[in-house]
């Protein structure tokens, strides 16, 4: 299955980096003709309750109605690489929604492979944004998969280490985190 969202592509243009990535990746995939060979699913935003499965309610609330105080924004990680902008909550809900929908397709056996290019936000912590990641859709997807499967192996291939995922599951034997990254931990 291939997950897509025109609204996500539109909102992601407001991000500080890689503003055109969603549009370019989807355009490239469409140009190859591969979408004719797979089930295409529209992504829907997840609910605040679904975000709160991993993220604190205070943080989810702050994404929806960001505080005006710069110091509070800094504590929440909503500055610099994760700035607040009009639609940030909707963007985060779509990022997580796509990953949760993909997880459900896999868990229910509706497909063997589910791809959502808007996901993979592996740096966000439960109570703050980090590293261009407003929410940690990876953790939300893993938690959803653990409702069906005894164990989950999370393989992360990225320039940076998946600190938000590793930290979240460091004390459980139900999640194995493998990270292949360009930069060292130090």
Image: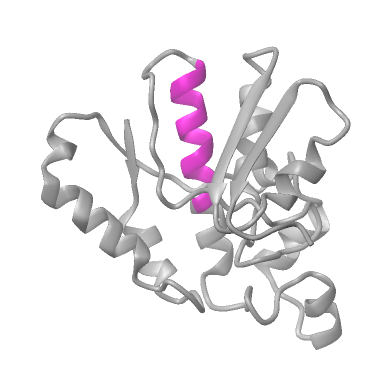
Magenta stretch in the rendered image: 95-107
Q: Examine the rendering and report whether any part of residue 30 can be seen.
A: yes
Magenta stretch prevailing secondary structure: helix
On screen, residue 128 versus residue 83, left or right, reads right
Based on the picture, tell me whether residue 103 belongs to the magenta stretch. yes
Q: Examine the rendering and report whether any part of residue 69 can be seen.
A: no
In the picture, the quarter occupied by the N terminus is top left
Q: Nearer the viewer, residue 162 or 38?
A: 162
In the rendered image, residue 155, in percent from the top left (x then y), is placed at 58, 35
In the rendered image, residue 51, in percent from the top left (x then y), is placed at 67, 46
On screen, residue 12 versus residue 16, left or right, reads left
Which residue is drawn at the image coordinates 75% and 57% (left, top)? 185
Number of marks present in the image shown: 0
Q: Nearer the viewer, residue 80 or 153?
A: 153
Residue at the outermost right position:
171
In the rendered image, residue 182, in percent from the top left (x then y), is placed at 58, 57
Tell me if residue 101 comes above or below residue 136 in the rendering. above
In the picture, the quarter occupied by the C terminus is bottom right
Which residue is drawn at the image coordinates 22% and 29% (left, top)? 38
The image's colour scheme reads one colour
Which residue is drawn at the image coordinates 74% and 61% (left, top)? 61
Tell me if residue 61 comes above or below residue 147 in the rendering. below
In the rendered image, residue 112, in percent from the top left (x then y), is placed at 38, 19
User: Which of the 4 image quarters holds residue 159?
Assistant: bottom right
Which residue is drawn at the image coordinates 34% and 52% (left, top)? 5
User: Which of the 4 image quarters holds residue 19?
Assistant: bottom left
Based on the picture, tell me whether residue 82 belongs to the magenta stretch. no
Tell me if residue 111 comes above or below residue 102 in the rendering. above
């Amino acid at each position: 299955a291939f997950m897509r969202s025109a609204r996500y592509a539109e909102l992601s243009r407001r991000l500080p980096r890689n503003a055109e990535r969603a549009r370019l990746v989807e355009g490239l995939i469409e140009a190859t003709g591969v979408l004719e060979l797979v089930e295409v699913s529209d992504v829907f935003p997840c609910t605040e309750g679904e975000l709160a499965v991993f993220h604190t309610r205070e943080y989810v609330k702050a994404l929806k109605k960001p505080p005006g105080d710069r110091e509070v924004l800094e504590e929440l990680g909503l500055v610099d690489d994760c700035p607040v902008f009009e639609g940030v909550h909707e963007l985060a809900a779509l990022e997580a929604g796509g990953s949760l929908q993909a997880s459900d397709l896999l868990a229910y056996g509706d497909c063997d492979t589910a791809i959502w290019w808007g996901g993979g936000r592996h740096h966000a912590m439960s109570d703050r944004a980090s590293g261009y990641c407003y929410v940690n859709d990876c953790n939300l997807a893993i938690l959803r998969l653990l409702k069906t499967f005894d164990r989950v192996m999370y393989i992360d291939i990225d320039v940076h280490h998946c600190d938000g995922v590793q930290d979240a599951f460091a004390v459980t034997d139900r999640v194995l985190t493998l990270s292949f990254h360009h930069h060292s931990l130090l």
